[in-house]
Amino acid sequence: MKIRFAITALALLGILCAAPTLAESPDKYQVTGTVEEVSDTMIVVMKGKERFEIARDAGTKVAGTLAKGAKVTVKYKMTATSVEVKADKASSSTKKKAA
């Protein structure tokens, strides 16, 4: 009985510890279209008139032959590389009035 309780408690603890990691992962996206350009660092996919430039690296999994003109579905994530916070218009206008 004690062993069953211990196993259940450990399983529940494992699930609870993994939940925050799963909740904070960024959304995944996909695009299906025709390859316009391909290099070791980038894939360009045209979906109608929209052009998608997607970075790739050695860890990118490719199933099949990736070449210009191939129809592909690319799954990707968006990751911020930098963020610049702009001053709020309301706070900058109150500073001018105070001066």
Image (cartoon, helix red, strand yellow):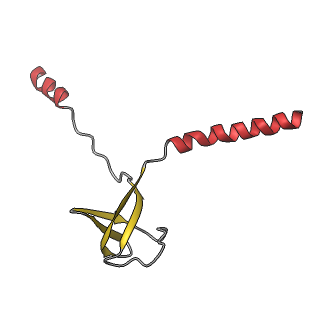
Quadrant where the C terminus sits is top left
- How many numbered marks are there? 0
Instruction: Find residue 32 and report its horizontal and vertical position in percent.
Output: 35, 63
Quadrant where the N terminus sits is top right
Q: Viewed as shown, does residue 32 lie left or right of 23?
A: left
Q: Which of the 4 image quadrants contains residue 84?
A: top left
Instruction: Find residue 90 and report its horizontal and vertical position in percent.
Output: 17, 27
Q: Nearer the viewer, residue 21 or 92?
A: 21
Query: Relative to 34, does residue 65 appear above or below in the rendering?
Result: below
Q: Viewed as shown, does residue 41 lie left or right of 22?
A: left
| Residue drawn where x is 39% and y is 75% of the image | 40
Instruction: Find residue 17 and report its horizontal and vertical position in percent.
Output: 63, 40
Query: Relative to 62, does residue 19 appear above or below in the rendering?
Result: above
Q: Which of the 4 image quadrants contains residue 33?
A: bottom left
Query: Relative to 55, does residue 84 appear above or below in the rendering?
Result: above
| Residue drawn where x is 64% and y is 37% of the image | 16
